[in-house]
Amino acid sequence: MNNLPFRNRRGQPASSLSATDAKKQFGRVLDMVLRGGAVVITKHDQPKAILLSVDDFNALAKATESTLDTLSADFDAMFARMQTPRARARRP
């Protein structure tokens, strides 16, 4: 298995496995992922998929949600400031 520049959320490098080998060795691959690893599935030596644990997936999904929540709150606060009488009085 070759290492590619992909890493799991703990910064450990992902392993690489061809699609054919992944099919033949799915039990071993699943064990690797369940122990906290990530496996890059390649086809013709190109990364095509990444197998990762539900915990890693949820961490990635949650990171996006919290970023969007923060941006939404920032936008709402900025919009509210723009609607004050003082801000409206500054319009040309």
Image (cartoon, rainbow, N blue to C red):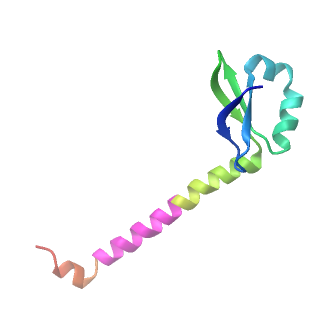
Residue drawn at the location 73% of the way across and 20% of the way down: 19
Expressed as whole percent of the image width and height from the top left, the position of residue 17 reads 75, 24
Q: Quadrant of the N terminus?
A: top right
Question: What is the magenta segment's predominant secondary structure?
Answer: helix
Farthest-out residue, left: 92
Q: Quadrant of the C terminus?
A: bottom left
Rendered position, 36 above or below 59: above
Which image quarter: residue 91?
A: bottom left
The front one of 48 and 3 is 3
Residue drawn at the location 76% of the way across and 46% of the way down: 54
Question: Is 41 included in the stretch rendered in magenta?
Answer: no
Q: Relative to residue 22, is residue 67 drawn left or right?
A: left
Residue drawn at the location 85% of the way across and 19% of the way down: 24
Farthest-out residue, bottom: 86
Rendered position, 58 above or below 89: above
Q: Relative to residue 82, is residue 14 drawn left or right?
A: right
Expressed as whole percent of the image width and height from the top left, the position of residue 62 reads 63, 56
Q: Relative to residue 91, is residue 87 drawn left or right?
A: right
Which image quarter: residue 30?
A: top right
Rendered position, 66 above or below 2: below
Expressed as whole percent of the image width and height from the top left, the position of residue 29 reads 83, 31
Expressed as whole percent of the image width and height from the top left, the position of residue 53 reads 77, 44
Rendered position, 3 above or below 88: above
Question: Is 69 included in the stretch rendered in magenta?
Answer: yes
Q: Which residues are magenta?
A: 68-82
Q: Relative to residue 29, is residue 56 drawn left or right?
A: left
Which image quarter: residue 44?
A: top right
The front one of 46 and 59 is 46
Residue drawn at the location 57% of the way across and 61% of the way down: 66
The front one of 28 and 3 is 3
